[in-house]
Image: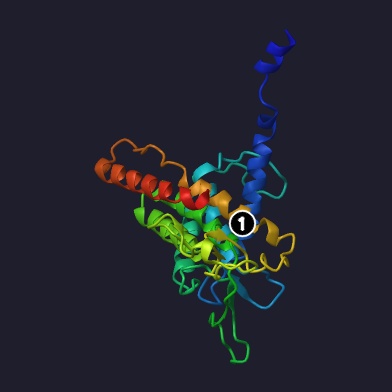
Amino acid sequence: GLRKIIESMPWQGYNWFSSFAHRSRIFWNLGSHGWETRFCNGGMVWNPRLNPYKNAITNELWVSASISMYEHFPGDNFTAPWLANAAFPDNDPAHLEAAMEGYNWLMNVNMTNSRGLFVDGYHIDRSKPGNTKCDIRDEMVYTYNQGVLLTGQRGLWAVTGGASYLEDGHILIQSVIEATGWSLKNNKPVDDPKQVRPGQLPPWRGLGRGGIMEEQCDASGTCSQDGQTFKSIFFHHFITFCVPLDPLRVDEGITADMRGYRRVKAAHATACRSYLGWVR
């Protein structure tokens, strides 16, 4: 009797559905104030209280959050005294526009190094009077900066059908794998671990060694508690990106290239399977 009653009750989360939707919209709206074009011709500011810093993570989060809002925001009918209009639709074009604008800025601002990895970000050289250009680049590379954008790329593909977003994601993943000292072609580490002398490590390859992803602080044991979580952030978004592609949804009256879709779906699945040896 009690079990049936419990099973027939709405899940507790549904009671908070409207509140959570409202909170996500308010939070996104607050975040949108971080986008400005005076410095570096665009981009999100990391911290408005400090000297302007346009960094990878803030902009990657903005892209991924914005496209996720466009994909999943359920609409918001929550009333609050500071709102002029309490009814907001799902699929708000502002979310899509922000994601696409943010992505285009990030991919064209020279935020990747010679290995194809995202560096930390850009400061503005204050020694030049009136300078507003991104011209002092922080070359530090962290694992999480290579991951967060993958959710944005996957979402942008799902919404627009643009295969280039998936291609960009795979190029990034493959750059990461190569920078850990792993050969996708041979499905093994570039450096033979048997050739490494006792007490020594394989050579650093840009984001790890011996096929193992590392932060620069790992080998010396100097990572902060933040740094100890970074690789999990990468893999969270890596998994989101590599989930098999959703079935194609075509609105009535729209013609779809099914052959092209199947080709992209197969290429995506093949590429993601090729990463398994490295993941293991």
In this view of the protein, which residue sits in the foreground, 103 or 131? 103
Structure colour scheme = rainbow
User: Residue 97, percent across and down?
Assistant: 47, 57
Q: Residue at x 45, y 51 (%)?
A: 275
Q: Is residue 227 visible?
A: yes
Q: Residue at x 61, y 46 (%)?
A: 85
In this view of the protein, which residue sits in the foreground, 272 or 64? 272
Q: Is residue 94 visible?
A: no
User: Residue 79, percent across and down?
Assistant: 68, 41
How many numbered discs sit on the rendered protein?
A: 1
Residue 137 against residue 78 in the figure, above or below? below
Q: Residue at x 55, y 70 (%)?
A: 204
Residue 73 against residue 232 in the figure, above or below? above
Quarter that holds the N terminus: top right
On screen, residue 9 versus residue 175, left or right, reads right
Residue 180 against residue 129 in the figure, above or below? above
On screen, residue 95 versus residue 80, left or right, reads left
What element does badge 1 sit on? helix
Q: Quadrant of residue 258?
A: top left
In this view of the protein, which residue sits in the foreground, 101 or 1? 1
Query: Could you classify mark 1 by the number of other residues whose Cα lies within 10 Å: few (under 14), some (14-19), or many (20 or more)?
Result: some
User: Residue 115, percent across and down?
Assistant: 46, 71
Q: Amino acid at mark 1?
A: Lys
Q: Outermost residue toward the top?
A: 1
Residue 171 against residue 9 in the figure, above or below? below
In this view of the protein, which residue sits in the foreground, 186 or 154? 186
Residue on which the image places disc 1: 231
User: Residue 280, percent across and down?
Assistant: 53, 48
